[in-house]
Image (spheres, rainbow, N blue to C red):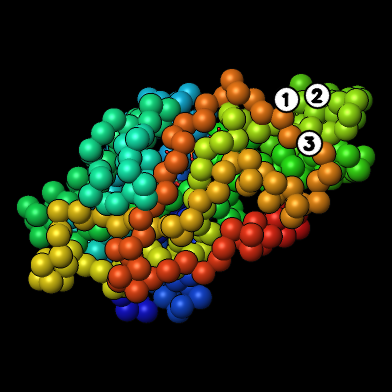
Amino acid sequence: MKKDSRIYIAGHRGLVGSAITNHLEEHGFSNLIARTSSELDLRDTRAVAVFFEEEQPEYVFLAAAKVGGIVANNTYRADFIHDNLMIQNNVIHQSYVHGVKKLLFLGSTCIYPKECPQPMKEEYLLTGPLEYTNEPYAIAKIAGIKMCESYNLQYGTDFISVMPTNLYGPNDNFDLEKSHVLPALLRKIHLGKALEQGDWKTIQRDLDRLPIEGVTGQSPQEDQLKMLHKYGVLLSDHGVQVEIWGTGAPMREFLWSQDMADACVFVMQKVDFKNLAEENVDVRNTHLNIGTGQDISIKDLALLIKKEVGFQGEFFFREDKPDGTLKKLTDVSKLKDLGWRYNVNLENGVKRMYEWYKE
Ligand SMILES: NC(=O)C1=CN([C@@H]2O[C@H](COP(=O)(O)OP(=O)(O)OC[C@H]3O[C@@H](n4cnc5c(N)ncnc54)[C@H](OP(=O)(O)O)[C@@H]3O)[C@@H](O)[C@H]2O)C=CC1
Ligand SMILES: C[C@H]1O[C@H](OP(=O)(O)OP(=O)(O)OC[C@H]2O[C@@H](n3cnc4c(=O)[nH]c(N)nc43)[C@H](O)[C@@H]2O)[C@@H](O)[C@@H](O)C1=O
């Protein structure tokens, strides 16, 4: 990629897309192309074709998708498979039609089997049944990997798929029903601390970030307690309690979003399908895991966030909510062999994320 290459970041406002956009701008790439979903709905085949005709991007970061946590995946199953297949099919196909030099497709480590040997290597794809709660999303992502691979083999394109582990950082999704675990716990523990300090101003400011159903404004504190209760932040007679979904036993790996952006630009610049083939690299796996190679239990994650936020209260476990896959640690040796490793560890990342969140 040259500094004036025409680079399209699909999903530029999202957690990953915004981090990639910032990274490219900071490194002097001056010809970035972006559209919001209201300007260009990537599920609309005709509109995507017209966009590519007009903009003629040379490089594409496909970071637009329908994304959510375990409960969102399990609730909106049809939307997760439909929207993601439509978005991927349109962007990958039009990238081929319009001769895009290279496309980077973002999948997810949920593509691996529920009982996958750990750590999960790229070649373990399709070797066993998937975790049911996010199977529609995972099937869509696997289809995206196979689409890139098939276009590379039939049409000689250079479309690479990367499989990120769980990500977190600025511009994350903090909707407590639909988000992933880290932003959800950060927000709930932040609200728990404000509640134990009687800091209603902080609570109101925070709840304003999400539409507040049923809050009349007549008796704000009572309304706020109602809302907090709904979001799993409770005032009980032995202090404030914050809910953790599931048992707290599952292990998860977390990569800071700006590290993820660095990895995406690294792969886009350093790795291409053709040179992998020439180096006799096993090119059937046209995907690369991106992660830290370290994981933590959900319970220990909550304790780490509790310490950073300064919350004194307790946790309680909602075992009626799903645990999902118990462990999904990525094997990152392929990416390490190519010369990339992450920078920001979880403790540092949570600290930075909380500083960003509470400003
Ligand atoms: N977050 C995570 O933990 C992980 C994410 N990933 C993958 O990384 C990629 C980025 O995820 P993340 O940044 O977290 O997602 P976000 O939800 O933060 O951002 C998704 C982006 O996709 C755009 N988008 C969604 N639907 C459409 C549509 N129909 N038309 C156009 N744009 C659309 C949104 O645009 P707008 O803002 O304009 O509405 C938004 O900017 C995804 O492919 C995801 O599967 C993989 C593993 C983990
Ligand atoms: C990136 C990845 O993300 C998703 O998979 P997931 O990692 O299982 O999702 P999650 O982050 O929502 O949960 C991780 C664990 O955390 C527990 N948990 C506790 N308390 C809360 C909580 O308050 N919110 C949430 N969301 N989870 C909680 C929760 O019960 C589970 O055990 C899929 O999109 C998948 O397709 C995918 O790609």
Q: Secondary structure at mark 3?
A: strand
Q: Position of residue 237 (x, y in %)?
A: 90, 25
Residue type at mark 3: give it: Glu
User: Label 3 crowding class (10 Å Cα cut-off): few <14, some 14-19, many 20+?
Assistant: some
Split into 4 quadrants, where in the image is the C terminus? bottom right
In percent of the image, x 29 and y 63: which residue is there? 334
Q: Is 102 left, or right, of 346 in this rendering?
A: left
Give the quarter of the image for residue 116.
top left
Residue, far left: 154
Q: Which residue is mark 3?
A: 314
Horizontal side, residue 277 vs residue 165: left or right: left
Q: CA distance from mark 2 to mark 3?
A: 19 Å
Q: Are marks 1 and 2 in contact (CB under 8 Å)?
A: yes
Residue 152: image x %, image y %?
Answer: 14, 56
SS at mark 2 in the image: helix
Gap between marks 1 and 3 measured at Cα:
17 Å
**Location of residue 54 with respect to 176 vertically, above or below:** below
